[in-house]
Structure formats: C-alpha cells, structure tokens
Image (cartoon, grey):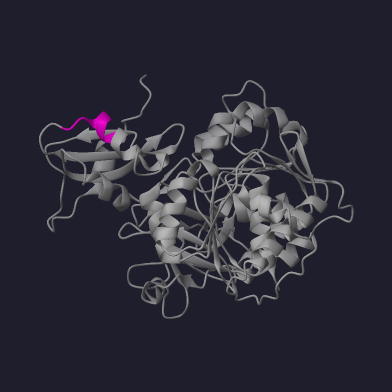
Amino acid sequence: MNLYTALRAGFPADLDSTAIDAEGALYSWRDLERGSAMLANWLDRLALPAGSRVAVHADKSVEGLVLYLAVLRAGHVYLPLNPAYHAAELEHFIADAAPAVVVCAGRNFGWVSKLAFQRGVRWVFTLNDDRSGTLLDRAAQMGDVHMPAERAAGDLAAILYTSGTTGRSKGAMLSHGNLLSNAETLKAYWDWKPDDVLLHALPIFDVHGLFIASHGALLNGSRMLWFNKFDAAAVARRLPEATVFMGVPTLYTRLLHEKQLDCRHMRLFISGSAPLLAETWHDWEARTGHRILERYGMSETLMLTSNPCRAEDGARMPGTVGRPLPGVGLRVVGDDGRACATGEIGGVQVRGPNVFGGYWQMPEKTAEEFTADGWFRTGDVGRLDEAGYLTLIGRSKDLIISGGFNVYPAEVEGFLNELPGVGESAVIGVPHEDFGEAVVAVITARGQPDPDALIAALKAHIAGFKVPKRILVVPELPRNAMGKVQKKLLREQHAAVFATPG
C-alpha cells in the first residue's frame, strides 16, 4: 500500500476542520488533500521515471509537508536535506542520489540550480516558507484530484543521508512498509487519543520531525500547532492548547528558562535524537509534573525502543531509552558475538519491519552492517537491565549529537585540515548545558593559526551546527601505540570547556 493512502485513511470525517494551525495560518484536512493532489499531478506531468528521487533543500513550512505527501502520492522517493547544508555538502547528495527534481529555497536558487544542472538534474524549483515559490506556481495550474500510485510495502519511499566516522554520507533506504509499520506501532504504543493536539516545533528534514511527529498526527487525524522555527517563548504560549509535544533535549532545556509553562492539557512529552540528561528529566518533572518519555531510534531503523507511555506498562526511567517496541527485536552482543548477560555492556543489534533495506548503491557497506543472521549493527553500545530497559553507554562510532543534529567528526576534520595554519585536527563532542554536546576541534599548528578565523572560514563551507564552537591549539595530539588519535582521552581532557564556573 502507498504510505500516503494509509495516512489519508487517518484523516477525520470532517475534512474542513483544522489540520494545521501554523501560527495563525489555518490549513484544513481538505487543504492537505487538495494541495498534495495538485503537486502530485505536477510531478506526474513531468513524466519522471518511476521511483525518481525528489531532493528538498528548503526551509520548514506546511507546504513542505504537503510536498512530501505529494511525492508519496506520485510514487517517487523523497530525499529531505537540511537547509543549512552548503554547496560542498549538497554536491555529494545530488551526485550520489541523482535526483530528477531538486526543490530549494528561493534565496539559494542561483547556486543550487547551477550545482544541480551541472550534475544532470533537469528540474529545479523553489519553495519558500511564506507560501511562495515556482513549485507552487506550477502546481496551481493543476487539478486537485489525484489517484495515488500503487506501491508495495517493499518499494522505496524515502532516502535519508547518514554517515559513519569515515567517508562521506550514505543514503539509508526506507520503504513504504518501514515507515507505515513504525507509525502504526507508535500510534498504539504512545496511546494516541482522538482529541490529541501535537505541538510541532521540530525540523522536517529528519526522522524525528518528518516521520515520527508528522506521521503520528496524520495517521491519528490530530491537529498540529505548527512552528516553522523553534521559539521557546512562542511555544510556551501555545502549550495550553496542546496534548503532545516532541522535542530534542535542547528544546526542553530552553523551555525550562521560560517563566511560565502551562501544561494543563498536556498528556505526553517525548524526547529523542540525543541523550536526555537525568538532571533535565528531573527538572522538567519538578517544574511541570510530567515525566518525559525518552525513546531511541536511528535514520536506518526509525524508532526502536521507548519508555512506557501507559502507567500499567511500567515506569519511565531517566537515563534509559526504555524497552524494544512491539515487533522490534533487540539484542546486546559482546565482541565474541555472544549475547551479553543482564547488565553487561555490548554492541546493540536490531531487526524488525522498521529496519531499512540498505544503503543507496552501497551493497558492500550494507552487507557489512548486517550480521549473518540478519540483525543490523547499530554502532551503539549499551546494556539491558532486569526489566528489559536499554541504557545507551556511548557510540562505537565517534558521532557527535549537538542540539539534536548529527555531526560526523571525519567530515569536519576534512574541511578543517585544508585550512591554512592547521597541521592536524581531531573533532570531538564535549558536554554542553544547552546543546547536550558541543563540537570542539583540537588542532596542531603550522605557523600561528587564529581559531576565530578558522571558525569563520568553516562557516562558509559547512552547516552552522557542524562548525566547532571552540578550536583549541595543542603541541600534539595524544596517540596510542598504533598511532591512532585517542579521542576518548581528548574528550576527558576537555570535558569542562563549557562548564559553568562555581
């Protein structure tokens, strides 16, 4: 079944009721149906090959969500890209995925279209967060009735680019079945109610905001209070109207600074995409009376585990990501390949209908990441307790999660090492009160590099969330007997860089 058809089945009977309230701009369920039909008809008119990739490098907007639904309806493959990406990053995605269509913000059309056309992309359109752009202009000419393309559960629906600590990003292929099975599981496990209202303040270029939050509301026919950008004061003002909120830990720490948090109708607060400090969990409970539900997932797998939603299913435990979701298999395995005993630390492996089919055009890498008996190696390290709750200890890869965004050290190091005055670099994540982890670069010098100038140079090449917040110059980087830089030691040495005095 086409995922759109399943989501559409969740729309309420009254299609003229409000589906999305975007800071006063109201969209009905009929608007979502008609708008996605018109955009799907435009995609059909382009006569794209079946399963073509549609890359979207645009700011968050309701129209962006409608475009996602249209791509599903037309039977193509959605490729969301962080609008903060610069040319060097975007070039890799376009070269690798070979999209038939690229949609970008109007302010970026000049450089994005040049890059796309050089890579053989035929169609480049603009989409802005103020309901303007050439894409909407074209779609306005089309009819508002569209029959969704037939798709099987195993057919590709989306590609999300992720990465390891070496090499460039790789595309995780998610099928209609992967996305639908996870959405249906979460609808039941998180006990979505008929009158739930979701406060949506997350980006829609990743799993959390696009698939988990949006799918949940659409499948349940729930109204969304929509923010194109997170603003703590604005979000706090609308909390009294909501029942469900999903955020990364940074959003919770920022909301705690607000004078008033009126949670009179709130049913569920969910946190993910980065570890939630137990201190934040306890501070939130003390302030609001609500215990945040922490869960765990990946681009390759969608959601894997969750703390309980219903009291009868158990307690929500700070510092853990809960138990495996229904239908998800999870095991913790030692270096010898044997299952770890309760409380023993090992590598986390998973399987289930939510787990992706592999990496785009990387069969060898795909085979490498799966065990012989079909379990996906997450690269995370953790332990299971007696109650089956998973605690994540760290990452076998040096992934940094800053403010909910993934930062891959090798990529940043590649750009940094090319800058004048840098001998060698090691990029690490260190504790930060607001971002959870902050990106820090430790470098050796060739001459007398200016850390501030290096940071400014990086900002011209990579997304802001990847740019180190601090660059430290040292005589040499610590190495082990094999010559490998000891990042664990660097993290320990510089753990207090952003510590608050006193």
Which residue is rendered at x = 64% and y = 57% of the image?
Answer: 68
* Residue 328 sits inside the magenta stretch: no
* Residue 450 sits inside the magenta stretch: yes
Q: Which of 173 and 493 is in front in this view?
A: 173
Which residue is rendered at x = 61% and y = 24% of the image?
Answer: 258
Q: Nearer the viewer, residue 423 or 87?
A: 87
Q: What stretch is highlighted in magenta?
A: 449-455
Q: Quadrant of residue 306?
A: bottom right
Horizontally, is 72 left or right of 174 in the view? right
Is there any visible trace of residue 191 in the rendered image? no
The answer to whether residue 175 is above or below residue 29 is: below
Q: Residue furthest right?
A: 14
Q: Nearer the viewer, residue 469 or 372?
A: 469
Q: Is the magenta stretch mostly helix, strand or loop?
A: helix
**Where does residue 87 sit, x and y in percent of width and height?**
39, 49
Q: Which of 246 and 3 is in front in this view?
A: 3
Which residue is rendered at x = 13% and y = 59% of the image?
Answer: 482
The answer to whether residue 376 is above or below residue 60 is: below
Name the quarter where the N terminus is drawn: bottom right
Which residue is rendered at x = 32% and y = 56% of the image?
Answer: 165
Q: Quadrant of residue 187?
A: bottom right
Total marks in image: 0
**Where does residue 172 sit, x and y in percent of width and height?**
48, 65
**Where does residue 130 sit, x and y in percent of width and height?**
65, 38
The answer to whether residue 421 is above or below residue 502 is: below
**Where does residue 153 sit, x and y in percent of width and height?**
64, 75
Is there any visible trace of residue 151 in the rendered image? yes
